[in-house]
Amino acid sequence: MEVINRYITIKNHVDGAPQDSDFELRFSPLSLFLDPASHEVIVKNLYLSIDPYQLNRMKSYSSSQQTSNYAVAITPGEDIDTYGVGKVVASGNPKFDKGHIVAGLLKWGEFTVVKPGGMLNKLDPMGFPLSYHVGILGFSGLTAYAGFFEVCKPKKGEKVFVSAASGSVGNLVGQFAKALGCYVVGSAGSKEKVALLKERLGFDDAFNYREETDLKSTLQRYFPDGIDIYFDNVGGDMQQAAVSNMNINGRIAVCGVISEYTDRENRAAPSMMDVIYKRLKIQGFLAGDYMKLFGDFLSTTCDHLRTGKIQPLEDISDGVESIPSALINLFRGQNIGKKIVRIAED
Amino acid sequence: MEVINRYITIKNHVDGAPQDSDFELRFSPLSLFLDPASHEVIVKNLYLSIDPYQLNRMKSYSSSQQTSNYAVAITPGEDIDTYGVGKVVASGNPKFDKGHIVAGLLKWGEFTVVKPGGMLNKLDPMGFPLSYHVGILGFSGLTAYAGFFEVCKPKKGEKVFVSAASGSVGNLVGQFAKALGCYVVGSAGSKEKVALLKERLGFDDAFNYREETDLKSTLQRYFPDGIDIYFDNVGGDMQQAAVSNMNINGRIAVCGVISEYTDRENRAAPSMMDVIYKRLKIQGFLAGDYMKLFGDFLSTTCDHLRTGKIQPLEDISDGVESIPSALINLFRGQNIGKKIVRIAED
């Protein structure tokens, strides 16, 4: 049997904010017959994770492409991989049977041919919707969990600031911090997001950074006793303002720098006097280094989901053709929570 | 008996680079008679440590004054404390007798009246010159030792970059790193200093940053395989260039930011993309937090001094009236090694 696989590529390198015209929907015939000796698996993609870091892979040059297996450069015209959940439709690999639900490195398209050695695992949904396994129970969740618990080493009662707090990772960091008994304030880019953080996710407070003119004073207002932990998803001015408001022995986990992704000159210049005298630690990290925590992360997060201590926050769009706008809108702050594209229901 | 104590104060707050006109030599009579119940001790100052951080204490405002017991603000006209070595000339404290050699918090002057509870300890010179106990065996030494071994967690064979490498702390970090078996390159501000690092202190290489126009390429040239550890004494452009050249899991110990001391706007804006993808740690620290290591530090350093593995590097000027120029010259890069003022021989 043969199908037409529709998939998304980039037409050119993307060095600023991504635009519709950077992307192309392509079609190619795909045979669903696999030689049993091929060890390949064909997956029908169901849910795909849409992540800001993909933009770094699309640039003509980014230091990220040199320094990490997690952000290998994307060549224009070639297919693009991402974390996702799907269903096996053909298998030449004895570990997988037709009908198996799987999670792993899939393509920005309707089908993925997973080569031998490709990242693919059978998925037990554990009673949760499949989309959860792309976000809150996938890498976004692990990023929040490892970054908060391992990098920041939080203690109950500490004061935690999260930027991009309604984003895929930020909303979870805030919820993990609340579950631990921290005081949590988040920043986001709209009134609607701020309301959601306070009313639905239980943040102690939140503010719309677009309404603030002096972030240093803003943070002083929200943290009169200083910040112990800053979970940084944005870099730039916000990081600089946070450093000024950190307490002694404060920790900053640098998870994302949206400010640098689309403009590499838009950088934070934090006061190193503060870094020294307050003995601050600024630590970059990647979730992929913490795979050994995946089991702990999963059981903790599932427990919190079952007891309602943590809410999933998903922003789902439909169909392969919605992938480009899903990515583009991340950089316009138009997502609320984890951005996911549902390629098919089943 | 009464003596005239000559001491140095500041006439005003000092907010830029310090100048001669900021300082004043004052005289005041001092009785050397102490009531045995006073618990005070009068110390004749012998060697005083001159340190860049004193400038932060002299500013009208510095965040360092708020965040640390180690950099309490100095009020113009009042006496100024510093680490030093002296000799007890009168004691109302049963722990100290006349003639004892002591180390602790002394004054920028000829005598110090140490109040009850003041930091003062009997000193065993262990066969080394007293000046060593102000520098290489004092806080400069502990700063280098704790910062390098505890903050950077070095491994044999790692590639280490030290800025201000002929300074009081930098020269020791380089020597500790060489003793451990690291590859070490230092930056300094003159040909003479560069030659000294390579020829006398055994650095693998060194360069004069004043002769370089693009520090990022400079570091690339000296570290074709990248930097594992950067011991940062200067901040600013050099930190930014170092971040670009760090290896995965690199560590940056932020010990000093000469660039910010005299101009708080002269800041580094390191790429947070690099910080994330290379999982860099940027950690500020103060030696005072590592007093528990003092014993280890002292025995290790004394051993290295006895076997000649480590050389002391001292820059000594004479007399209380030389204190202002000693501090001023630190910011002009005119010291080589630990800056010490010898107030009296004995």
Image (cartoon, coloured by chain):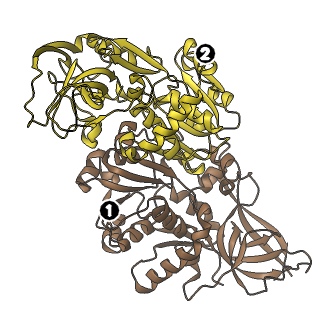
Chain colours: A yellow, B brown
Q: Is residue A286 above or below residue B292?
A: above
Q: Is residue B231 left or right of residue B330?
A: left
Determine if residue B266 is in view. no
Q: Dot 1, crowdedness within 10 Å: few (<14), some or many (≥20)?
A: some
Mark 2: secondary structure: helix
Disc 2 to disc 1: CB gap under 8 Å: no
Q: Quadrant of the N terminus of chain A?
A: top left
| Residue pointed to by mark 1 | B158
Q: Is residue B10 visible?
A: yes
Nearest to the observer: residue B197 or residue B279? B279
x, y (%) of residue B331?
51, 54
Name the residue at 73% across, 69% down: B119
Local packing at callout 2 (Cα closer than 10 Å; few below 14, some 14-19, many 20+) is: some
Q: Chain of mark 2?
A: A
Q: Position of residue B43 (x, y in %)?
A: 75, 77
Quarter-wise, where is residue A340 in the image? top left
Three-letter code, disc 2: Ala
Q: Report how far apart the C-alphas of labels 2 and 1 lie in the structure.
A: 49 Å
Residue at position x 25%, y 25% in the image: A99
* Nearer to me, B181 or A266: B181
Please identify the quadrant where the C terminus of chain A is shown: top left
Q: Residue A39: percent from the left, percent from the top? A: 13, 37
Left or right, B60 with reference to B49: right
Closer to the camera in the image, B332 or B294: B294
Please say if B242 is above or below A225.
Answer: below
Query: In terms of secondary structure, where does tag 1 sit?
Result: loop
Number of numbered discs: 2
In this rendering, which labeled residue sits more in front, label 2 or label 1?
2
Give the residue pinned by disc 2. Answer: A195
Q: Is residue A336 above or below residue A264?
A: above
Percent x, y of residue B131: 57, 78
The residue type indicated by label 1 comes to: Glu
